[in-house]
Each structure stands twice: as structure tokens, then as C-alpha cells.
Image (cartoon, rainbow, N blue to C red):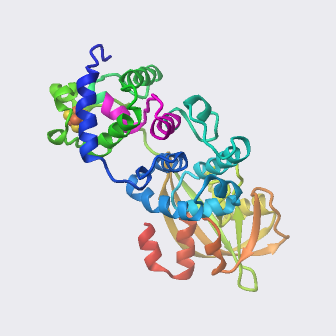
Amino acid sequence: MADDLKPPALHRLLLAWFDAERADLPWRRDRDPYRVWLSEIMLQQTQVPTVIPYFSRFLERFPTVENLARAPLDDVLKAWEGLGYYSRARNLHRTAQIIAQEHGGEFPASPGALRKLPGIGRYTAGAIASIAFGADAPVLDGNVIRVLARLYDIADDVTQPATHTALWTLAERLVPPGQAGAWNEALMDLGRRICTPRDPRCALCSVRDWCAAFQAGTQRERPVRPPRTKTPHYDVTAAVIHHPDGQVLIAQRPLDKMLGGLWEFPGGKREPGETLRACLKREILEELGVGLRVGEQIGVVRHGYTHFRITLYAFHCEIMSGEPQAIGCAAWTWATLGDLDRFAFPVTDRKIIALLRGDQLALDLET
Ligand code: SF4
């Protein structure tokens, strides 16, 4: 792989393109490590246009790492609501507390020290160290993998550990000393704007003369990945449990589970052969220790996560026996429909709230 790296010409061309065309993004307006770190965590799994408003609102709410460290986790999750992959928000909060308490409020500058912090892997450590501190550290994410696999026409499956290791070595060898931050951002920008996944814009690409895949006409076949397997689908139920005084019951998901710390209408996954109503009664007994009467169906919400899809059936319910206890959840509470805006919910439960409020606009916007 890449015996002939040709880095000086590649560096000159790509850095000149980046200098002229760099995207004006809010986190690039200064090199403050807090802003770089926040943007890199938000950009994991999330597109730039989605991140921009979240980034600005988050900084207004938590302008410094100390503000973030002092905030309750619920407030951090609320600011993150809708961005998905909530373990990022929990790790962000824990890392802010470690920075505030153990590092005097200053981020460590080396990739090795950064990687000891929760939620910071090799890519994010390389990005923070190179962009905020000028360290000669490489980055390798999906965008950079695609660019390198095309520039060097790599025919090996990039999901294989050996290929991945070789790509890191290549990324490391390509870093121009003293210019790692600009180089890494240039690779990211090229991957996001020009060397795009399905339809690379080679005619506009400043490095096409050095691109082996372009020369070979294989750019659409790179990077090589195994064929996709079918995404599993699950039926899931949710109970909107009404109190006689008009409030509804919400439960907080266990912190160590997917969507941990977020609030939801309790329920769970239907077992094979189980009816939706039987599923809901079983789930609520297991989670809250109460017997349920399941009433009318409120609606159906469909949602796709990274590795599976769900169809969520929500029902009006009332408690027939027992007092709720936090058995399979972190906490539970009664809340009025108006109060629900104070809590952080996954997108599926926000759609149930919109159904309860008859809010078609919110449903359309979130679909
Ligand atoms: Fe990507 Fe095409 Fe540029 Fe090669 S020439 S790096 S495939 S955009």
C-alpha cells in the first residue's frame, strides 16, 4: 500500500486548496481546545449542518468547560436532545468534570493524555492535539478513510483490522510536520465536500493528478467494504400512563443502557408470539412493578437507529394495581404535558408527545 507516497506535491496542492476554500465553520473561528473538542464530539456520527445550531446553543448554555462540569447531567442531555448517540453527551459531561477537577480546567495537549479521557478515541485525540495544540498527530475517520482509499486506490476491505491499521500508518506518514491541524482539516473538508461517498466530484478536485483511483477509474469502487446485511426490525410498545389528576408517568432510562439518562414513556420490545398489549403489561410490571389496563392506541412511530429499526406502538394506559417503583429504570415521575418540555427525550418519545398534543407541525419536522 502506498509505496510511493508523493507527499510534498500532495501537501502543497491540498493545503493550497484548503487555504483558498476552507469551510467557514463556527468551531474554526478560534483554536480553543474546548470548542475543538465539543465540535469533534458532536461531529461523530452527525453531519455538519445538523451540528452547527447545536454547537452554538451548547456554547451559549455552557460557555466554558467549568460551566459544563458544574451542570447537572439532565441539563446536558436536554441540550443534546435530538442529536442522538447520547453516550457522547454523558462522556462529554464526565470529561468536563475530569478536566475541571484533575487538570485545573486545561485540556492536556498530547494525543496519549487526551485518549485517557472518556469518549476520546484515537481519531478525536488526533484532531484536538493537531488542531488546538499543533501536534503532528494524524486523524482517521470515515471521510479520511474514503479519501486515502481513493488517493492510493486501496483494494483491501477497509473494515478489516489489518487494513485499518495500515490506513493509520499511512495517515501518520502523510502528516506534514508543523502543519498537521490544517492538513487534517483539509482531508476532512475534501472528504465531506469533494470526495463524497457516492458521487465524488473529481473534476473539481485539486489532487486528482495524484489520485490513483481517479487515474484507474475505480473511485466509485473505493473504499471497499463488505456488502450490507439486512437491518433487523423490532416492534416496541410504550405506555402513556395517565394519573387521575391529568399527569402522565415518565421513566428515566438506566444510565448504562442505550439512550441512558433520557426520559421516555415506559415499555419495551415485543417477544415472539406476544400481542402488543400483553407485551406492554409485561414490560410495565417488570420495569415499574404495577399492573396495567391498556386502553386505546395513540399512534405508531417508526424510527431507524444505526443497527436496527423499530416500529413503536403507543397506548393510553392506567394503573390497576400497585405503586410504581424504579425496578428497571433509573427513576420515574408524574408530569403534566406542559412539564414534559423540561425533560430530555429520544426522538421517538418526542413524537408521542406531539401526538398527545395534536401537534402535526412537530411530527412533520421530526419525521
Ligand atoms: Fe476523490 Fe476524485 Fe479527488 Fe480522487 S480525484 S481524491 S476520487 S474527488
Residue at the far top in the pictured view: 3
Tell me residue 205's x, y (percent). 19, 38
Left or right, 270 with respect to 13, comes to right
**Up-down relation of residue 7 to residue 296 (above or below):** above
Q: In the rendered structure, which segment of residues is drawn in magenta?
A: 125-148
Viewer-proximal residue among 207 and 21: 21
Which percent across, then down, holds residue 53?
A: 45, 63
Residue 169 x %, y %: 42, 20
Magenta span: predominant SS is helix
Residue drawn where x is 24% and y is 37% of the image: 16
Q: Nearer the viewer, residue 18 or 357?
A: 18
Q: Residue at x 68, y 80 (%)?
A: 336
319 in relation to 83, above or below: below
Q: Taking the image as drawn, is residue 227 in sight? A: no
Q: Quadrant of the N terminus?
A: top left
**For the point 56% across and 31% down, which residue is it?**
110
Question: Farthest right residue?
Answer: 322
